Amino acid sequence: MALVTTAEVCDANPQLILSGELRALQPIFQIYGRRQVFSGPIVTLKVFEDNVLVREFLEEKGNGRVLVVDGGASLRCAILGGNPVVQAQNNGWAGIIVNGCIRDVDEINGCDIGVRALGSHPMKANKKGMGEKHVPITIAGTRIGDGEWLYADTDGILISRTELSV
């Protein structure tokens, strides 16, 4: 879906918005990384102040997917740092959405990957390995399922039940 903005997608699909098949996340995320426009199938993860599972996912081949992490909107530590983002870029992930904080912003901003997060924080997360993979999550006022599609640009982030074509 190249060169089509999220605003244009919304304008062209009022029926999908009405049915709930196309949803927009509330505009609470900061933009990081060099790739401001990205899309792909979603992989969901739910953690709280723990980044072990985040790192494990990003060590896998991304194949153009987007990791969406419900970090419980914690602002007490960062659950994503520069090294895992470099690894995600090298492994072919399209983007990462973090309902929580990141750290190593300068390193992340040098990566050719899309990253959205609530903000940055200098403290590291715990390393207990607690969390849930591939579960429905709710962030930014929107329920998101594993396998749905995400479309992001500087206007916002859309979630679609299916891949959109133009």
Image (cartoon, grey):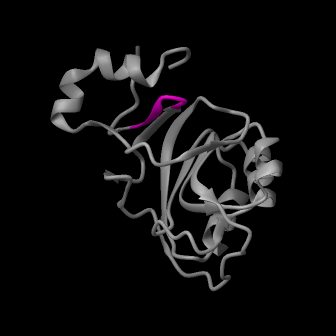
Image coordinates for residue 154, horizontal then vertical, percent: 54, 30
Residue 8: x percent and y percent? 39, 16
Query: Residue, x 51% and y 67% (percent of image)?
Result: 71
* Badge count: 0
Q: Left or right: 26 with respect to 110?
A: left
Q: Magenta segment, which residues?
A: 153-158
In the image, 42 versus 102, the foreground residue is 102
Image coordinates of residue 48 in percent, x first then y, are: 52, 76
Asked which quadrant contains residue 38, the reply is top right
Q: Quadrant of residue 92?
A: top right
Direction from residue 58 to residue 14 in the image, left or right = left
Q: Main secondary structure of the magenta part?
A: strand
Q: Give me the residue at 40% from left, 30% from top.
A: 163
Query: Residue 62 in magenta?
Result: no
Seen at 38% across and 43% down, the residue is 25
Quarter of the figure with residue 34 = top right
The quadrant of the image that shows the C terminus is top left
**Vertical position of residue 164 compared to residue 121: above or below:** above
* Residue 125 drawn above or below residue 116: below
Report whether 161 appears left or right of 90: left
Q: Of 66 and 50, which appears nearest the observer?
A: 50
**Residue at left offset 69%, top offset 50%:** 61
Q: Is residue 156 magenta?
A: yes
Position of 137 relative to 33 (above/below): below
Residue 139 position, x and y percent, is: 39, 56
